């Protein structure tokens, strides 16, 4: 009986020890993410950004910053006010392009919604509101019907929204976004491509708080005047 009790106690100690080890590992991991998200000097290729093997073409004389996002991504929603502010401050020297990532059926639906708003000329007014209703108001905007109904009276009608949603112009824009996403090998959002040369994405070294810091670092390397 004593042997059984001793064996049971030993098993309990081993189980508790294993739980402690896992808990410590989790704490260390999240501590690392938090610490490395704080700017601490120069940024290093391979850790904070990657140089693209095949640079993309940049139109115009301004430097280009292309954000990859989805309305279905909570991190993109949290990042949106920051990049909006940054773009306004640097519009004189930076051309900003926002590209929806179409990774699954819902995200494709959201990408189509983005370009429909753009075609209708209501994107500036309803981009943030649509984003907020998904993540803050928790509206069920997951089908064509619910989305089209949401836009009734918001600078358009449900019928007009549906028509533009299925238009050839929107389909062409979707195809272009998909091609760019594949060319730059974008696999996560939010992410930024700087001047068609560098890709900055969220990882253990870069959180949303550092995306713009790395972007500014790369633009300065490109001799682009910016306002930090």
Image (cartoon, grey):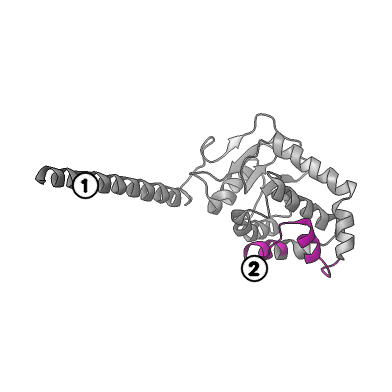
Side of 45 where 128 appears, left or right: right
Q: Residue at x 71, y 34 (%)?
A: 183
Q: Nearer the viewer, residue 38 or 156?
A: 156
Dot 2: element: loop
- Asked if the stretch drawn in magenta spans residue 172, the answer is no
User: Which residue in the protein does label 1 denote?
Assistant: 13
Q: Which residues are drawn in magenta? A: 130-156
Q: Nearer the viewer, residue 188 or 151?
A: 151
In this rendering, does residue 150 appear at all? yes
Tell me where residue 117 sits by quadrant. bottom right
Residue 12 at x, y percent in the picture: 23, 48
Residue 199 at x, y percent in the picture: 62, 40
What distance separates the C-alpha of mark 2 from that of mark 1? Answer: 47 Å
Q: Are marks 2 and 1 in contact (CB under 8 Å)?
A: no
Q: Residue at x 68, y 36 (%)?
A: 184
User: Which residue in the protein does label 2 denote?
Assistant: 137
Q: Looking at this view, name the residue that lies furthest to the front.
A: 1
- Asked if the stretch drawn in magenta spans residue 138, the answer is yes
| Front: mark 2 or 1 | 1
Q: Nearer the viewer, residue 189 or 163?
A: 163
Mark toward the start of the polypeptide (2 vs 1) = 1
Side of 164 where 145 appears, left or right: left
Q: Residue at x 70, y 59 (%)?
A: 88
Q: Residue at x 78, y 43 (%)?
A: 61
């Amino acid at each position: 009986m004593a042997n059984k009790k001793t064996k049971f106690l030993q098993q309990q100690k081993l189980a508790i020890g294993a739980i402690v080890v896992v808990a410590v590992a989790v704490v260390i991991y999240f501590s690392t993410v938090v610490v490395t998200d704080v700017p601490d000097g120069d940024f290093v290729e391979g850790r904070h950004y990657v140089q693209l093997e095949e640079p993309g073409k940049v139109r115009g004389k301004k430097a280009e910053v292309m954000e990859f996002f989805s309305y279905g991504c909570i991190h993109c929603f949290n990042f949106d006010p920051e990049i909006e502010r940054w773009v306004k401050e640097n519009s004189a020297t930076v051309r900003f392009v926002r590209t929806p990532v179409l990774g699954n059926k819902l995200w494709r639906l959201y990408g189509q919604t983005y370009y429909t708003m753009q075609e209708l000329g209501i994107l500036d007014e309803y981009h943030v509101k649509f984003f907020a209703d998904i993540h803050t108001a928790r509206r069920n905007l997951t089908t064509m019907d619910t989305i089209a109904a949401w836009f009734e009276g918001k600078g358009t009608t449900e019928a007009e929204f549906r028509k533009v949603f299925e238009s050839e112009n929107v389909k062409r824009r979707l195809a272009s976004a998909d091609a760019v996403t594949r060319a730059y090998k974008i696999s996560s959002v939010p992410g930024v491509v700087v001047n068609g040369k560098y890709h900055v994405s969220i990882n253990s070294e870069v959180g949303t708080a550092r995306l713009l810091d790395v972007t500014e670092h790369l633009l300065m390397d490109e001799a682009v005047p910016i306002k930090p």
